[in-house]
Amino acid sequence: MTAAHDFNQWTVLSRFQNRLLTKPRKEYSLIHNMRTLQMMFSSSSTFFLWLLLIFSVTFSHVFGDKFFIGTYGVNYGRIADNLPSPHSVVTLLKASKIRNVRIYDVNQEVLTAFKGSGIQLSVCLPNELLKEMSVGEDRAMSWIKENVQPYLPGTRIRGIAIGNEILGGGDIELWEALLPAAKNIYSALDKLNLAHEIQVTTPHSEAVFGTSFPPSAGSFRDDILPYMKPLLQFFSQTGTPFFINAYPFLAYKNDPQHIDINYALFKKNHGIYDAKTKLHYDNMFDAQVDAAYAALEKVGYDKMEVIVSETGWASHGDDNEAGATVKNARTYNKNLRKKLLKKKGTPYRPNKAVKAYIFALFNENLKPGPTSERNFGLFKPDGSIAYDIGFPGLVPSSATPSLLSFKGIASSYIMVLTSCATLLSLIVTL
């Protein structure tokens, strides 16, 4: 081993150690033991690099965003009667390397299945419970103790969404209950010393905007402002991002005569020019995100991050649902995934990597509404891909479909994890 090569290894390790200066003694001990191992195996650079890789993967939560790993997530809706078990879903998510997931309730079977998976999970307080939670903190505390606390820390619950698309909806009483419900849930988490581990959020629909085109004109509806401003103030105090459900599919479906399908699908097109900011947009997704940033800026929250809590494209729809095809769904989701994996920002926030949860993991055959509502899935119920955007899927065998494949991949994960656990126990005891 050359002196330069040896120096580079020590430099890398020192940087890891410097980033752990505020961490507990146990993690100092681990770094110290890794130094000892490096000295023991200094003649084998391959071994040390392999060991460092295992360390960085296993303890990535120490260095990364505790609420959202990377930039890509998915929504796991379950309004269906043909979906695989939650344990099989966890195997599918791991095989696809999807590390951020949103669910729309606090289902016990799902929360138990995610235990030990390492996947960041956001749960939801359903709309129908908002009024009850807004009345007093005692009910919020009971809900947390019953539906969240028992699953920690094994199940990595990192967010609680207070309802879904409340502001702009038809029930004004829910508008009024949203902020007090959020405050009561947050207060309960704080008293249980969980507020620093779990974000209290709420996702909005595009209905909260009065104007969103061009992006610089983005602004909230006048009738929503009395509810939005105090909500933003609260989330600003708790360091919570602004969550928006952004669907170029819905915009195109509602006005296919005036919207270029290529602009909606991230394909080559002339795009739009925003004269105020002098920025060019070559896709609608970026424009929708920047419209949210502009609206936040107008009410004094220009530092608040925007995260897309839902986006996707339907693979099938009714005759009047323009653009709902498998080809378009594949194009949108594949191009969006490429964009997110590059960790780039938008024209208005170029240095802030966009984060998004894709809707959805599976088609949901029991959802009401138009046909498109039941056809947003990336995967089929047996775990195979609905269309190819780069995920492997779990291909079923001809005999016993999905369970055989799920179990096969699961055992591989168990073998790898067992090996890593053995090695790490060795490190800690050195």
Image (cartoon, rainbow, N blue to C red):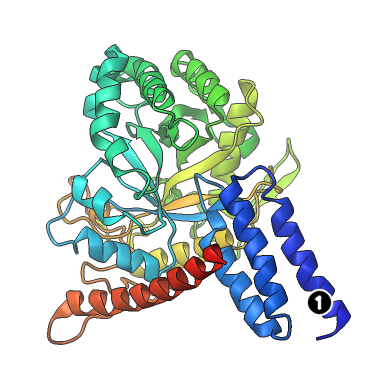
Quadrant where the image shows the C terminus: bottom right
Residue at the image point whose x is 46% and y is 30% from the top: 195
Q: Residue at x 66, y 84 (%)?
A: 46
Percent x, y of residue 75: 35, 51
From the viewer's side, name the closer residue of 123 and 257. 123
Describe the element under mark 1 as helix, strand or loop. Answer: helix
In this view, the residue in front, 147 or 228, is: 147
Question: Which residue in the structure is indicated by mark 1?
Answer: 6
Taking the image as shown, residue 36 lies to the left or right of residue 396, namely right
Answer with left or right where residue 355 lies relative to residue 313: right
- Residue 397, visible in the rendered structure: yes
Q: In the figure, 372 relative to 169: above or below?
A: below
Establish if 170 lies above or below 205.
above
Question: In the figure, is residue 11 to the left or right of 98?
Answer: right
Q: Nearer the viewer, residue 387 or 33?
A: 33
Residue placed furthest toward the front: 430
Q: Quadrant of residue 268?
A: bottom right
Tell me the kind of residue under disc 1: Asp
Across and down, in percent, residue 426 comes to 51, 70
Question: Where does residue 50 sit, x and y in percent of width and height?
Answer: 60, 78
Q: Residues within 10 Å of mark 1 (few under 14, many from 20)?
A: some
Q: Quadrant of residue 314?
A: bottom left
The answer to whether residue 171 is seen in the rendering is no
Task: State which quadrant residue 187 falls in.
Answer: top left
**Residue pictured at 59% horizontal, 28% vertical:** 296
The residue furthest right is 3
Q: Name the quadrant of the N terminus.
A: bottom right
Q: Position of residue 138 (x, y in %)?
A: 27, 16
